[in-house]
Image (tube, rainbow, N blue to C red):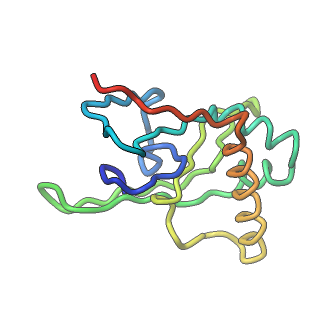
Amino acid sequence: MAYTSAKLGLHTDLNYYNYKPGVQMLHCIEQTKGEGGDNSLVDGFNAAHQLKEENPDAFRLLTTLKVAFCHFGIDYQKYIHKQRQNIIRLNDHGEIQSISYSDPTRASILDMPADQVQPFYDALKAFNTIMYLPRNCVRLKMAAG
């Protein structure tokens, strides 16, 4: 979906890597003159803190259940990148360390107990709802340059 005109929901990039950059920049070379082309930006740490306050069970699930993210294809050779991690990763002190959130790269098969699947999706939906709240989601159209 990236590099197309299709709508791309909120996500973090490179979740299928063991080590991902702490900062990523967007460069807009050319912007459409018509409708569309907006970016949606969210402070994921702030949204995770809100989830912890509003729905501690959902927060606990997203910090304890690991999911797989994968990306595969052919460049100069075939490749597959795969990594299992929490949606919300905590450090050794229980503080939020990173967010790994991407429906397009999240593997479709969940390797977790069957009784945790529905609660996991409910927790993911709760986090998604918080991120898309108008107070949390900033929409802007980048200028070329």
Quadrant in the picture for residue 120: bottom right
Q: Residue at x 37, y 30 (%)?
A: 26
Give 18 or 136, whichever is nearer the viewer: 136
In the rendered image, the vertical position of residue 28 relative to residue 122, given as above or below: above
Q: Residue furthest bottom?
A: 114
**In the rendered view, does 124 fall on the left or right side of 28?**
right
In the rendered image, the vertical position of residue 109 relative to residue 132, given as above or below: below
Q: Quadrant of the C terminus?
A: top left
In x, y percent, where is residue 67? 58, 60
Q: Residue at x 68, y 43 (%)?
A: 131
Q: Quadrant of the N terminus?
A: bottom left
**In the rendered view, does 61 fall on the left or right side of 109?**
right
**In the rendered view, does 97 fall on the left or right side of 26?**
right
In the rendered image, the vertical position of residue 84 relative to residue 46, given as above or below: below
In x, y percent, where is residue 74? 19, 61
In x, y percent, where is residue 86? 63, 50
Quadrant in the picture for residue 94: top right
In x, y percent, where is residue 38? 46, 39
Give 76 or 2, whichever is nearer the viewer: 2
Exactly how many numbered labels are in the figure? 0
Q: Residue furthest top?
A: 145
Q: Residue at x 75, y 29 (%)?
A: 93
Q: Residue at x 78, y 66 (%)?
A: 119
Q: Residue furthest left?
A: 76
In the rendered image, the vertical position of residue 30 relative to residue 36, given as above or below: above
**In the rendered view, does 66 fall on the left or right side of 142?**
right
Quadrant in the picture for residue 138: top right
Give 131 or 95, whichever is nearer the viewer: 131
